[in-house]
Image (cartoon, rainbow, N blue to C red):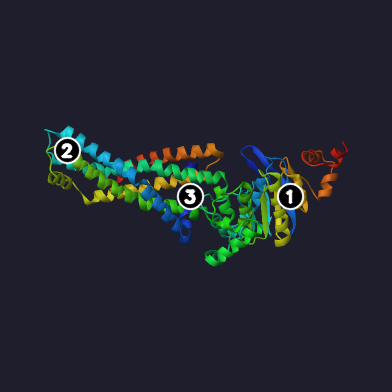
């Protein structure tokens, strides 16, 4: 289980998170919605310990992330796959090397046969052609880079998957492919997922539950139906931008 | 002072990451090749010109006042004690320092360093140690090449403008030579290598704010490492030659 209790974070004078309370139960996929610049990615980075909170607690499987020692944090990170917004693939390494870095077991990592088989397996799982493993990130399209990023995140068989805007910058067709992939990984691998996005349609398709971050706080959590029925003006404003709610459908 | 503290933290990270030999050694070989082979031409060119000009100027100043063999002394001592390591250091601060800061800065702003950390891997052993170790090994080697080529170029240039034989030049070179001079050149090269690698790695590692941040880090890396080289030059001369 992932739990954030009263998490606060400021960069300079700018308050990003102002007391976030957020719980994700094992096995569920939660979409974290919110307009750009509201701190969704910052929240995600707290969970994996890339950013430390100014106040509050971030707990993963009961472990206080900010208080973990170096080795403990590395061990925890092996349990969490992180899909970065733009892939964050290593430019100087080919796809095979990029994905192999996600193999957390050092013995298996050093085993060339295991690594090659496992990388080929996840490349197939994310619907990429087998010959992509010899290519460099600069030779891939945006959608392919995102899928390689997902392959790298799942190759170590994590318990949790954190997606940072996996469909941003993609055309609708590629966005649907990625959403379908996230949905399939959740079903097939049974991982617990948090998907940061401002794509409401994708979130409704993929997530069991949604949460809306606004003004540094989670202002609503609930199911798709609860969101659509919400009278909260901020929720309505956010949904109406790219989704047909009962209110604007009537209008 | 904040920078000093953070650079110290980075050095601690480097020492911590040294035990991950399997990670950094292969990468260090690649970096060493880049530094050594990639910089050899410019290093030899600059040192050859420095040696030649030193010989010409010595010939101009000393003709008629001092024996010609002094030119040998002056060229060898100037190149080995000062010009070889300092010129190589400043050139490599631009060539290698800018590259390291830009590479790591780009990796920072494109979240590649965050990605490495998120995979439970140490950015120090993957990115910094290979660069620092390669620099600490290869830069002194380049300085040795620079010293040799600078002296040979000085000999050639001196013979073009002065009635000087190779034996005269060698006599002058040996007359004031201390074996410590060679060690001093290497010690300087080693310290300069630390500045040329660690400072740009730090600047690149702490890059912020997109492309502008990468530009600022790169410029800062070259300027800072060049200034540190000049400061180290003074400090090492005082400590090692005058204490």
**Dot 2 surroundings within 10 Å: few (below 14), some, or many (20 or more)?**
few
The N terminus of chain A: image quadrant: bottom right
Q: Secondary structure at mark 1?
A: strand
**Disc 3: which residue:** B10
Q: Is B215 above or below relative to A163?
A: above
**Disc 1: which residue:** A31
Between the residue at mark 1 and the residue at mark 3, the CA separation in whole angstroms equals 37 Å
Q: Are marks 2 and 1 on the same chain?
A: no
Tag of residue B160? 2
Query: Where in the figure is residue A209, as x and y percent of width and height?
Result: 78, 52
Query: Where in the figure is residue A120, as x and y percent of width and height?
Result: 60, 61
**Which residue is rendered at x = 56% and y = 50% of the image?**
A137
Q: Secondary structure at mark 3?
A: helix
As drawn, is B218 to the left or to the right of A17? left
Between the residue at mark 3 and the residue at mark 2, the CA separation in whole angstroms equals 50 Å
- Disc nearest the viewer among 1 and 3: 1
Query: Where in the figure is residue B228, as x and y percent of width and height?
Result: 39, 41
**Dot 3 surroundings within 10 Å: few (below 14), some, or many (20 or more)?**
some
Q: Secondary structure at mark 2?
A: helix
Tag of residue A245? none
Q: Are marks 1 and 3 on the same chain?
A: no
**Which residue is rendered at x = 61% and y = 38% of the image?**
A12
Chain letter of mark 3 equals B
Query: Where in the figure is residue A198, as x and y percent of width and height?
Result: 72, 43
The C terminus of chain A: image quadrant: top right
């Amino acid at each position: 289980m992932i739990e954030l209790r009263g998490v606060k974070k400021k960069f300079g004078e700018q308050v990003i998170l102002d007391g976030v309370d957020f719980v994700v139960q094992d096995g569920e996929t939660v979409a974290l919605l919110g307009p750009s610049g509201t701190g969704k990615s910052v929240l995600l980075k707290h969970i994996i310990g890339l950013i430390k909170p100014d106040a509050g607690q971030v707990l993963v499987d009961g472990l206080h992330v900010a208080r973990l020692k170096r080795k403990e944090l590395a061990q925890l990170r092996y349990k969490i796959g992180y899909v970065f917004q733009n892939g964050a693939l290593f430019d100087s390494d080919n796809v095979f090397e990029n994905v192999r870095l996600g193999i957390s077991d050092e013995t298996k990592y050093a085993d060339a046969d295991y690594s090659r088989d496992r990388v080929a397996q996840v490349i197939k799982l994310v619907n990429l052609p087998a010959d992509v493993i010899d290519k460099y990130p600069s030779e891939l399209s945006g959608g392919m880079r995102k899928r390689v990023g997902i392959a790298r995140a799942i190759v170590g068989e994590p318990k949790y998957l954190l997606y940072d805007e996996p469909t941003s910058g993609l055309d609708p067709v590629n966005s649907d492919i990625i959403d379908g992939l996230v949905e399939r990984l959740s079903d097939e691998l049974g991982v617990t997922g948090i998907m940061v996005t401002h794509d409401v349609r994708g979130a409704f398709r993929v997530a069991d539950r949604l949460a809306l971050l606004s003004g540094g706080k989670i202002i609503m959590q609930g199911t798709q139906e609860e969101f659509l029925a919400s009278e909260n003006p901020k929720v309505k404003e956010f949904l109406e931008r790219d989704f047909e709610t009962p209110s604007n459908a009537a209008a | 002072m904040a920078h000093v503290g953070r650079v110290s933290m980075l050095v601690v990270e480097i020492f911590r990451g040294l035990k991950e030999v399997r990670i950094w050694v292969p990468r260090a070989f690649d970096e060493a090749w880049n530094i050594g082979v990639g910089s050899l031409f410019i290093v030899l060119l600059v040192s050859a010109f420095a040696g030649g000009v030193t010989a010409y100027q010595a010939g101009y100043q000393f003709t008629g006042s001092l024996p010609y063999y002094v030119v040998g002394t002056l060229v060898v001592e100037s190149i080995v004690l000062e010009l070889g390591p300092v010129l190589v250091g400043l050139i490599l601060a631009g060539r290698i320092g800018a590259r390291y800061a830009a590479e790591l800065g780009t990796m920072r702003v494109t979240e590649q360093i965050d990605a490495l950390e998120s995979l439970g891997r140490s950015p120090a052993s993957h990115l910094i140690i290979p660069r620092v170790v390669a620099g600490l090994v290869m830069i002194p080697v380049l300085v040795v090449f620079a010293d040799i080529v600078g002296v040979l170029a000085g000999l050639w240039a001196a013979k073009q403008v002065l009635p000087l034989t190779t034996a005269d030049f060698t006599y002058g070179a040996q007359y004031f030579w201390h074996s410590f001079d060679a060690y001093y050149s290497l010690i300087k090269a080693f310290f300069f290598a630390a500045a040329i690698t660690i400072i740009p790695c730090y600047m690149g590692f702490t890059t912020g704010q997109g492309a502008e941040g990468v530009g600022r880090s790169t410029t800062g890396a070259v300027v800072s490492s060049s200034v540190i080289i000049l400061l180290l030059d003074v400090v090492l001369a005082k400590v090692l030659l005058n204490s």
